[in-house]
Image (cartoon, rainbow, N blue to C red):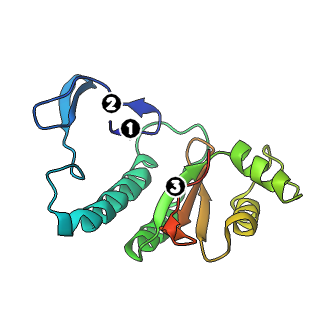
Amino acid sequence: MQTTRGRNFGGSRSSNGGRTANWNGRKTSTKRTTGTNVASGYKNLCTNFERKINSFRTLCNQVKGTARAGRPSPTTLNSFCNWINKGAVIQCCTPAQVSRWARAKNKNFNTKTATPASCKNVLAAKFGKSTIKAVAKTKTGTFMVATSPTFKGKKFCFPK
């Protein structure tokens, strides 16, 4: 099922293996690409394409709709776009998650006055400086993080 932060595209299964949903009065469908339809030699390539698409979608969502907190600047979004082009993956984490990881390393992290620089320091201490590329605040107040696609030889995803 395709999800975008804050929106769940539920619905019924369509004949193409994806899901159909009504969103803003329009019927949309999403087709699975990493299923059995992908040739075996192209599965990793397809997975990389999907990661990039989802990362660009995260950036695009920062300029659409209303913003509870300040939006990232065009320069910041362009910088993150360049990180994606270099192979990074954009992921989001909440200040509460960062605070929990900071406590594990005996660091002080205030969720109310958290800055991208303090978040980057905590994340770099937890996951390594080569894994965390850049950090910025999103329009919802969470942190958008450009990360390396792998960590210790495995696909990298923030723990919940």
Under tag 1, what secondary structure? strand
- Circles 1 and 2, Cβ within 8 Å, touching? The answer is yes
Is 92 displayed left or right of 25 in the figure? right
**Which image quarter is the N terminus in?**
top left
Mark 3 belongs to which amino acid? Answer: Gln
Residue drawn 46% across the image and 69% down it: 88
Write down the quadrant of residue 23 in the picture: top left
- To which residue does mark 3 refer? 91
Mark number for residue 9? 2
Under tag 2, what secondary structure? loop
Q: Real-space Cα distance between discs 3 and 1?
A: 14 Å
Mark 1 belongs to which amino acid? Answer: Thr
As rendered, which of 113 and 21 lies closer to the eye?
Answer: 21
Q: Is 159 above or below relative to 85?
A: above
As rendered, which of 81 and 147 lies closer to the eye?
Answer: 147
**Which image quarter is the C terminus in?**
top right
Q: Real-space Cα distance between discs 2 and 3?
A: 19 Å
First in sequence: mark 3 vs mark 1: 1
What percent of the width, then of the height, locates residue 44? Answer: 29, 66
- Is residue 75 something that shows in the picture? no
Extreme residue in the left direction = 15
First in sequence: mark 2 vs mark 3: 2
- To which residue does mark 1 refer? 3
Query: 10 Å neighbourhood of mark 1: few (<14), some, or many (≥20)?
Result: few
